Amino acid sequence: MQKIASVLRSDGTDGRILLGFQGVSPDEIDLEEPVFIYDDGLPVPYFVSEWTRRGNSKAICRLTGLRSQEDAEEIVGRDVYADLELDEDDPSALEGWTVLSETGAKVGEVSGYEDIPGNLCLYVRTADGSEVLLPFHDDLLISADPDTETLILRIPDGLL
């Protein structure tokens, strides 16, 4: 799951909320698929039943299960997640994420990307300030944690 937005405030008295999007455009959200908001450490699915864009990075929406202002106020400030495929046209959402090797050693932070056709690569700034170019492929991705913005990659020998 990828963090897509934060609940900025309630909107009205009938459970609508204002979402502020981060790293994705509201147009990238599949309204047929659920979004998730964590409650007590567990992702709770919600479906979007109403949707109105507000500018380039905000939307007012109603989520299933939110029926009152009190319901909406309860989730203000929380992050909203969705199961999104990495959009190879905009991998910039990973910029700033921490990269760890499969042993747990910190490699550095994603500072950019190189869109080589069929082989997306990430620029990773290491602790000494240098940059390395690492392939970003499903076969090399061990895990991606949007809560901590951490990628764990299987890094082939000789790349570091």
Image: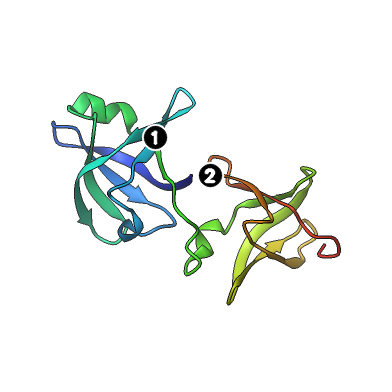
Q: Position of residue 97 (x, y in %)?
A: 60, 52
Residue type marked 2: Pro
Please give left or right for residue 47 compared with residue 36 in the image.
left
Q: Position of residue 80 (x, y in %)?
A: 39, 41
Q: Is residue 28 above or below residue 13?
A: below
The residue at 76%/63% (across/down) is 129
The residue at 17%/27% (across/down) is 68
In the image shown, does 143 or 13 lie closer to the viewer?
A: 143
Residue type marked 1: Ile
At label 1, counting other C-alpha atoms closer than 10 Å, the crowd grade (few under 14, some 14-19, many 20 or more) is many
Q: Which mark is residue 132?
A: none
Please give left or right for residue 95 compared with residue 76 in the image.
right
Residue 10 in which image quadrant: top left
Residue that sits furthest to the front in the current view:
139
At label 2, counting other C-alpha atoms closer than 10 Å, the crowd grade (few under 14, some 14-19, many 20 or more) is some
In the image shown, does 64 or 132 lie closer to the viewer?
A: 64
Q: Position of residue 51 (x, y in %)?
A: 20, 49
Q: How many marks?
A: 2
Give the quarter of the figure containing the C terminus. Answer: bottom right
Please give left or right for residue 98 compared with residue 8 in the image.
right
Residue that sits furthest to the left in the current view:
13
The residue at 44%/47% (across/down) is 83
Q: Position of residue 147 (x, y in %)?
A: 53, 40
Q: Is residue 106 above or below residue 25?
A: above
Kindly identify which residue carries mark 2: 146
Residue that sits furthest to the bottom in the current view:
117
Report, in whole angstroms, how far the alpha carbon at label 2 lies from the one at label 1. 12 Å
Kindly identify which residue carries mark 1: 37
The residue at 71%/62% (across/down) is 125
Dot 1 falls on a residue whose secondary structure is: strand
Mark nearer the N terminus (2 vs 1): 1
